[in-house]
Structure formats: structure tokens, C-alpha cells
Amino acid sequence: MSSVAPTKWAEDFASATNQDAELNVHGKFFTCTYLLDMGTRKVIVEMHRGKVENVNLDPQPLDAYQFALRAPEETWRGMAKEVPEPMYHGIWAASFRKGLRMEGDLLVLMQNLRCFTRQIELLRQTGVPV
Amino acid sequence: MANFSPVTGRYVTFEVDDPDLGGEYKVFFLENGRGQPLVCQHTAGCHNHQWRGVLEDPEITSSYRVIAYDLPRHGKSDPPNNREWWKEEYRLTTDFYTRFIVAFCDALELERPIFMGSSFGGNVALQLAYRYPDRFKAVIPVEAADYSPGFFLDWWQHPHANAAQVCASGVWDLMAPQSPDRDRWKTWFYYTQGSEAFRGDLYFYSVDHDLRGKLGEIDGDRCPVVMLTGDYDYLTTPQMTEATAKQIKNAEFMEMKGIGHFPMSENPPLFNTYLRRALELIQRKTAKVTGPAR
């Protein structure tokens, strides 16, 4: 699984998140808004109590988010493989070796790190919209 | 009949002489096996359960006395008995760390043990080969390099976040996705228990440990060095370890495939296959030095 159409990806990502056993058990306080910057495609994901409230596939200049992950398309595609190759196997690995940058209010990221880490791993099931 | 493990745990109390962190330490260790002592150091912010797969591997423990201690402030090893440590910022130094390990080996009256450590334990294995080459029969630095910057972060102990989860999930992708869930989650669980020490440990790992330009002074004949690194380790990549090993006289390097930065804990059976090869290499190298055993 890697590149998929944006609207399908948004549906799949929301569905995978909302049905995930781990997030359903541990997501009670997972409420935040973040940006995934995949180069040609940017999305803002709004989370509320562990569920996807909205996926904004066309962020406008003043659409707010608390933190952002920015990485080249190739990095996102590598992270979205069913079994990622070394250095594509997580946001920390990619930030050290594959050009991923964590930006914005990183405290919010750290406060939600357990759930966010799990949610980003769901890209291995859903692919990415680039 | 109770299903006992052959592994036993004990405490030992001894002094460590060091101007910054020295004092009296009560240290917990697990052990199993007979023969050549093999002393094991867990990774930063963790404890000795990471070595459960080595401690309970009968093939290894039939020839090696495997000893895995908890570094002070980790697991069941207390902070120092006679220092007001709560008034100090914990920053692990190379001086204390190496002195502690030598003092521990002295306390247990171990003669020339093999020392093995992973991550910050791997880096200190290099430091032991550099500083105390005659005290150890050999060292096995796992997931180590001459220099490993970037992980001395305030996030590990930030009071506005759940530090237990930040430490555990922050190191999650140091492990390979192929490693069994059961063992990865055990490792995650151990990491929820060490957040008060993790940041200070990483002062050693990412700041104080720096052997760049000094590796040529390590004599891999006097104290054989066998380095093992997993291909999913993003902190000390196989390339970094290989470059380190190349600068140490007669050091060996093995890349471990399909495993990450906590190999003995995230996938014990796979790690043990590489460890057995490392121990055989050491046996051959040390037999050469002391003359062939015939």
C-alpha cells in the first residue's frame, strides 16, 4: 500500500483510526489538530477524544493546527509500506535519517505521542495521498 | 510444582569512587549460568529485564555466567545511599559509568569478564576497552558508535507531558517493525518505568561519550571488540558502527538484519543467533592470544 487518491485516503484514514483497537482503548484524551505536509499534498487532521473529527484536504492559509510533520513525498511513501524499510519505520527514525521535520507546538505532539505514534503507523494500512 | 526460572536476583552493596556521582550503591542484578562471566548492561532509561532472552538461553548459560545488573537509579537499583541525589541534576558521566562497572565487577570478584551493553551500554563498552583494556576479556558493544548525538532532550522528563509515555513511545521506532509485538510491547513497558533517569543517561550517550579521534588508541588484540548493530537502528546506524569498528585495531563488526536498537529485548531469539557468533569469535580471538587450547 502506498499512494492513493486523497478523498479515498481521508475516508480510509478516518475509518482505520476510529476502528483501531489500541486507539479505542487509549485515545480518551487524544484531542489535537495537526498538519501532515507531504510536499504536493498537505492535510490537516482534527482529532477529538481519539476519533477523527475532520480531515481537511485543502488547507487554506489561515487554517490552524498545533503541530506539523513535514517530509518529502518519498519519505511518506516509505512510511506507508506494509513493512517499512529501515529509517522509514517511524516519525523519529524518519526525522533523524529521512528529512522529516517536526514543527509547531511539539509539547502537544509529546502529550499525545503514544496515540499519535500508533495513528501514523496506520498509514501502513491506508497508504498516503501522494 | 512451581514453574521457576533458573534466573536468580540478588543485591550487592559497594562504593564507587567518583567526585561527581560517587557514593555507596546498592545494586540489583540477575544471573544464570556457569563459566566465563558475561556482564550485561541494559539501555538508557531501562533495566535488566531487557536481557531476559540471554539469561534464559540454555545454550549460552551452559558456558557463560550471564550477569545483568540494573544501573543505579534504574529498575531495582537505588540511587546512592549517602548522597542527597534529589538535590542534584542527574547527568551520567563517562568517568562514573566506567568506574561503576569496574567496581561492580570487583564487588562480584569477577576475573576478566566479557562486557556487553546495548545503546548507551554499547558506547560504554567502547569506553571500557579504551580505559580499562586489561580488566575485561573482551567487549561486545551493541548498537554503539564513537559518537551518537541528538538524544539528550528535555522532552524525556517534561512535566507537562506524560514522561512515561514520551520515553516509551519516543523509543518505539528504535525497534524494527518485524520484531514480535509481544517483545516490543514488553520493551515499551520497561521504558515507562525509567523516565526520571532516561534524560540523565542520555547526557552520557549523546554528549559526554565522544571517542572521535581516539579509536586508534583502542587495542582490539589486548581487549577484543566485537560490534553488533541492527539495520533498523536510526541512532547508530550500521554504517556508523562499521565506521567505528574500522578505526579500532582488529575490531569486528556484524550487521544484524531485521532488528533495531534494543535487539536483545525486541527479538531475543534473533539477537541470540548473532550473540552466539560474537561469543565464538571472541573465543577464537582470545584462544589465539593465550595460545591454542589443545
Image (spheres, helix red, strand yellow):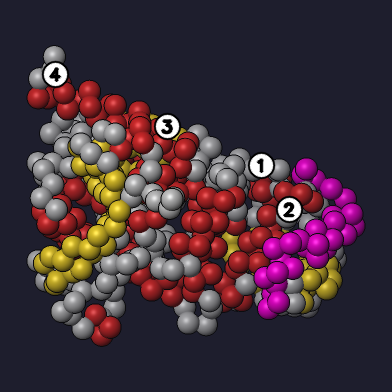
**What element does badge 1 sit on?**
loop
Q: Residue furthest right?
A: A7
Find out whether the residues at labels 2 and 1 contact each other: C-beta distance under 8 Å. no
Labels 2 and 1 positioned on one and the same chain? yes
Q: In this view, does B257 lie to the left or right of B63?
A: right
Q: What is the C-alpha distance between the residues marked 3 and 2? A: 32 Å
Q: Is residue B104 left or right of residue A74?
A: left
**What element does badge 2 sit on?**
helix
Q: Give the amino acid type for the residue marked by disc 3 in the picture.
A: Thr
Q: Give the amino acid type for the residue marked by disc 1 in the picture.
A: Val
Q: Name the residue under label 2.
A: A123
Residue positioned 10% across, 50% down in the render = B109
Q: Could you say which is closer to the camera, residue A56 or residue B277?
A: B277
Q: Mark 3 points at which residue?
A: B273
Q: Mark 1 points at which residue?
A: A83
Q: Is residue B144 above or below residue A45?
A: above
Q: Does the magenta stretch include residue A2?
A: yes
Whole-percent x, y for residue B94 in the image? 21, 59
Q: What is the C-alpha distance between the residues marked 3 and 4? A: 25 Å
Whole-percent x, y for residue B144 in the image? 34, 46
Q: Mark 4 points at which residue?
A: B293
Binning the other alpha carbons within 10 Å of mark 3 as few (below 14), some (14 to 19) or many (20 upward) gives few
In front: mark 3 or mark 2? 3
Q: Is residue B165 left or right of residue B112?
A: right
The chain identifier of the residue carrying mark 4 reads B
**What element does badge 4 sit on?**
loop
Highlighted magenta segment, given as a residue range: A1-30
Mark sitting earlier along the chain (3/4): 3
